[in-house]
């Protein structure tokens, strides 16, 4: 069975940086998509960045130029480097995975989810 576990969340001042990690276990697909989502109370989950098994990365306009998604296949770990953080980035952040690949992984069609990690940005 697939398990995803996020870590690295916390509280930071506006303009600061955090790096989120997502360790995957039981996920052995040769073709896949992985993504980072975020959610605030009263709103649905927003996909903010994705990466495929071909290592192609995409990001949403709301974080483009500030957040970078990457993966370390040897460690089965997904990362989200978050720079120039803003108060509106405050949310619970989730990693997600699916065992098939698409040309564009930046969508909402994911089946495996982590438990989430809280990011709070203060001004």
Image (cartoon, helix red, strand yellow):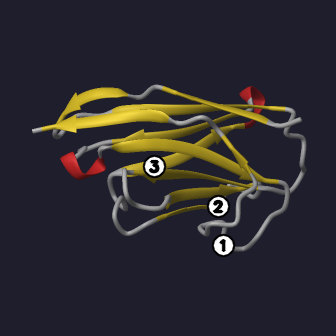
| Cα separation between marks 2 and 1 | 9 Å
State the image coordinates of residue 3 (x, y, percent, origin top left): 77, 33
Secondary element at tag 2 = loop
Mark positioned earlier in the residue sequence (2 or 3): 2
Residue at position x 39%, y 50% in the image: 67
Mark positioned earlier in the residue sequence (2 or 1): 2
Q: Is 84 placed above or below 103 here?
A: above
In which quadrant of the rendered image does the N terminus lie? top right
Disc 3 vs disc 1: Cβ atoms closer than 8 Å? Answer: no
Quickly name the residue at label 2: 56
Q: In which quadrant of the rendered view does residue 32 lie?
A: bottom right
Q: Nearer the viewer, residue 96 or 39?
A: 39
Between marks 2 and 1 in the image, the one whose residue lies nearer the viewer: 1
| Cα separation between marks 3 and 1 | 16 Å
Q: In which quadrant of the rendered view does residue 19 lie?
A: top left
Mark positioned earlier in the residue sequence (3 or 1): 3
Mark 3, residues whose alpha carbon is within 10 Å: few (<14), some, or many (≥20)? some
Residue 104 numbered tag: 1
State the image coordinates of residue 102 (x, y, percent, origin top left): 76, 70
State the image coordinates of residue 47 (x, y, percent, origin top left): 51, 61
| Cα separation between marks 2 and 3 | 12 Å
Question: Relative to residue 20, is residue 110 drawn left or right?
Answer: right
Question: Relative to residue 92, is residue 77 drawn left or right?
Answer: right
Q: Is 113 placed above or below 48 here?
A: above
Secondary element at tag 1 = loop
Residue at position x 41%, y 28% in the image: 9
Quickly name the residue at label 3: 68
Q: Is 58 placed above or below 111 here?
A: below
Secondary element at tag 3 = strand
In which quadrant of the rendered image does the C terminus lie? top left
């Amino acid at each position: 069975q697939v398990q995803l576990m996020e870590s690295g969340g916390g509280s930071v001042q506006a303009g600061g940086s955090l790096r989120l990690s997502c360790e995957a276990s039981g996920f052995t697909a040769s073709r896949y998509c992985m993504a980072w989502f975020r959610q605030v109370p009263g709103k649905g989950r927003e996909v903010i960045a994705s990466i495929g098994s071909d290592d192609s990365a995409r990001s949403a306009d709301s974080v483009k130029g500030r957040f970078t998604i990457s993966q370390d296949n040897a460690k089965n770990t997904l990362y989200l480097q978050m720079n120039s953080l803003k108060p509106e980035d405050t949310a619970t952040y989730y990693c997600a995975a699916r065992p098939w690949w698409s040309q564009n992984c930046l969508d909402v069609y994911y089946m495996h989810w982590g438990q989430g990690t809280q990011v709070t940005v203060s001004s």
